[in-house]
Image (cartoon, grey):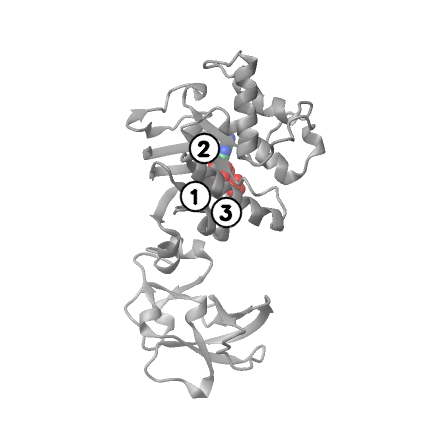
Amino acid sequence: MLTLSQVRRTYGDTIALDGVDFVVPENTYMSLLGASGAGKTTLLRLIAGFEEPDRGAISINGERIDGQPSHLRDIGFVFQNFALFPHLTVFENVAFGLRHRVNAPVKNEKEIKERTDNALELVGLDGFGHRAVSAISGGQRQRVALARTLVTEPRIVLLDEPLGALDANLRARMCDELKAIRERLKVSFLHVTGSETEALMMGDKVAVLAEGKIVQTGAPDALFAEPLNAASARHMNAWNIFEAGLCTGTVGQGPIAVRFDQIDVSAKEQSPDARPHLQARFLTGEFNGPTALFFFRAKDGTLLQIIDHLSQPRLPDLVEGENYDLHFAPDAVRQFQGAA
Ligand code: ATP
């Protein structure tokens, strides 16, 4: 189990991480979701030992690892750009980690061959060992990078936006493969990404990093359906967050959230009575195949989004620039503390 307690890291005036408490349990695929600049890479670099925290502790199974040299931590790191050696073959790229590691390099060629072949087989690249890394596809390069890390049998594998360099089709396929490989190995993966779909799809658990803190950790379905705060809801990219005061007949005060798929629309004069509602101007719609996304502007300027599913359409015909009544069931509302 990897544990971070009250970890802080600053760069000059920038507070990259501000009291991070975070646990990656054994045998878990953990996603870490955060916007650009949230501190994701910094967090991985502190765990790997490329940098040290200003404050706080990092431990594996109760043993402090912060302050230890990086090569003694037994932590694997897969970089976004894969960082392969372009002049070496696939086999030599993977074997490199074994031959040249500072801690107990492997000298026995038979062992190197056996372990390298096993790692290549694990990532589905058996038979590719002799190829130049310049002569394989992006997805295959990704797998070489993964094999190079796995061959050293790390205690945990850190993946920094591992799918970022792949095109959309390949990304979906690699998602399944990464999960399957991890399940075979039973070692924990910590996968950082800025994409909520990737985080929710990959993670057995998902943590949300915002403004230098972990704002929520949970199972993907729970996180999506029950964000605990506005920051967490915003990262799901599925919730409208607005001031309760904008609504008639709503609950409480402060920021509230209603999911994109839980708001209905009526013409202004057909306001339903019992449901919380607010007025907003229709801006435009965007069709995405089986769903359509409609954008509205509330009176205070807040942008609101509503999803309609084409198999069960529930929105009337909308005219751009017209005002409509947006309403929802009282129990669709999530109420948060603090500022929106
Ligand atoms: P992205 O998704 O864009 O890669 P990130 O979540 O990985 O972002 P970090 O790279 O961890 O974010 O950066 C967190 C904050 O720390 C940012 O404000 C960044 O500008 C700052 N930062 C990171 N590294 C340094 C550095 N070496 N010197 C100064 N500031 C830095």
Choose the circle earlier in sequence order: 1 or 2: 1
Question: In percent of the image, x 40 and y 37: which residue is there?
Answer: 17
Which quadrant does the N terminus fall into?
A: top left
Question: In percent of the image, x 53 and y 43: which residue is there?
Answer: 177
Name which residue type carries label 3: Gly
Q: Which mark is residue 32?
A: 1
Cβ atoms under marks 1 and 3 closer than 8 Å: no
Q: Secondary structure at mark 1?
A: strand
User: Residue 108 location in percent, x, y?
Assistant: 53, 12
Question: In percent of the image, x 34 and y 68: which residue is there?
Answer: 333
User: Residue 317 location in percent, x, y?
Assistant: 56, 82
Would you call the spot at circle 3 few (<14 residues within 10 Å), some (14-19), or many (20 or more)? many
Would you call the spot at circle 1 few (<14 residues within 10 Å), some (14-19), or many (20 or more)? many
Among all residues in the image, which is located at the extreme bottom? 269
Q: Is mark 1 within 8 Å of ligand 1?
A: no
Q: Which mark is residue 194?
A: 3
Disc 1/disc 2 C-alpha distance (Å): 13 Å
User: Residue 3 location in percent, x, y?
Assistant: 32, 33
Q: Is residue 200 left or right of residue 226?
A: right
Disc 1/disc 3 C-alpha distance (Å): 8 Å
Residue bearing mark 2: 157
Name which residue type carries label 1: Leu
